[in-house]
Amino acid sequence: VRDGNGIKGLVDSGLLEVPKIYIQPINERINKLETKPCDMPPIDLSKLNGKEHEKVVNEIVRAAETLGFFQVVNHCVPLELLESVKDSAHAFFNMPPEKKVVYRQNVSTSLKMRYQTIFAPEIENVLEWKDYINMVYSSDEDALQYWPNECKDVALEYLKLSSKIVKVILEILIGKLGVELDDSKIESLIGLKMVNMNYYPACPNPELTVGVGRHSDAGTITVLLQDGIGGLYVKAEDENDVGKVEWLEIPPIPGALVINVGDALEILSNGKYKSSEHRVMTTSNQSRVSVPLFTLPKFTEKIGPLPELVKKDGLAGYREVLWKDYMDNFYGVAHEGKKTLNFAK
Ligand code: AKG
């Protein structure tokens, strides 16, 4: 696995059973009995600024307050671009190992592009069934220089267009808190951007593994493009049965993008918007790709509940943290639900 071919290499070698290091303890395996499809209809962004504007705004706010996840359609990202993004993810992972290995963390020194097979190799005892690349954006020039040829152009275009969706949604969510933030403040809350391409190879024992373990996203808002295979589950409380946990599958909808709230927005909103735990199941007969755009505060930002809300709520549910410290902690612990948020408690 540590060569240039990741888990895909293991699978391509004809593996019939997953190696022990990928077998999850029973409590971390996805129990199908605890799952059901999420039936929330996708939100039509083309209706913003029209006669149904307020209705759409309320749908966005309600979704962010409850599940923390929703899907959007009629956004500004062309569907052909979304297809090209998925194709380019396959193109990268299908390259021969010698072409991929140059991007491995221990081979390449670039902080703008890295290729890995697991989340945090130094600290995890059981490994996730996922290969991925992480492309950090600093400027167009850097992206075109450091990101892989197989995907850099489409990934950059996807980042730019999806960032527009993020900004619109963030402005709505902040506005509905009754807080006014100027444009430069909004920009700095999403000033760090990265595109990942996740590749979950077909897995001989999907019931024993996870593609990604339970976690919440660190940042402000994530946009996720998933292909048609499915497997993304979000933790939800059952409204009719308090205390009962359900895992709702976010079903693939052609042309839709998944939006979710991250820890930074939960903190800023003093807990009003939910950064939900989510995880990914593997599949036995097909490889799956997904492409998240993570938008995060700049490292130099201090993130805490917005003062107007603390005043209104009479209490701060989180402490203020320097975003760089939050991220150092986030990358230093294994995936374990929303535990990373404790850093701001
Ligand atoms: C992540 O990359 O953090 C994810 O949660 C991926 C979700 C997915 O593959 O659907």
Image (spheres, grey):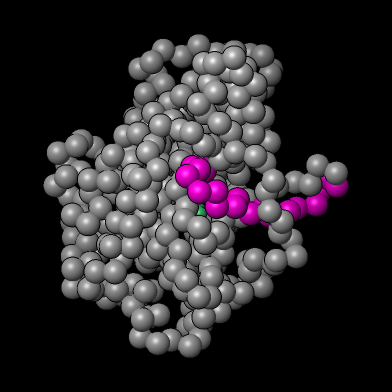
Quarter of the image holding residue 108? bottom left
Question: Total marks drawn?
Answer: 0
Tell me the quarter of the image containing the C terminus.
Answer: top right
Residue at the image point whose x is 33% and y is 41% from the top: 158
Q: Is residue 289 above or below residue 165?
A: below
Whether residue 242 appears in magenta in the rendering, the answer is yes
The overriding secondary structure of the stretch rendered in magenta is: loop
Quarter of the image holding residue 80? top left
Left or right: 230 with respect to 157?
right
Residue at the image point whose x is 28% and y is 62% from the top: 91
Q: Position of residue 269 (x, y in %)?
A: 58, 26
**Looking at the image, which is closer to me, 276 or 14?**
14
Left or right: 66 with respect to 96?
right
**Looking at the image, which is closer to me, 135 or 13?**
13
Q: Is residue 16 above or below residue 89?
A: below
> For the magenta stretch, what is the residue range?
241-258
Q: Position of residue 166 (x, y in %)?
A: 44, 31
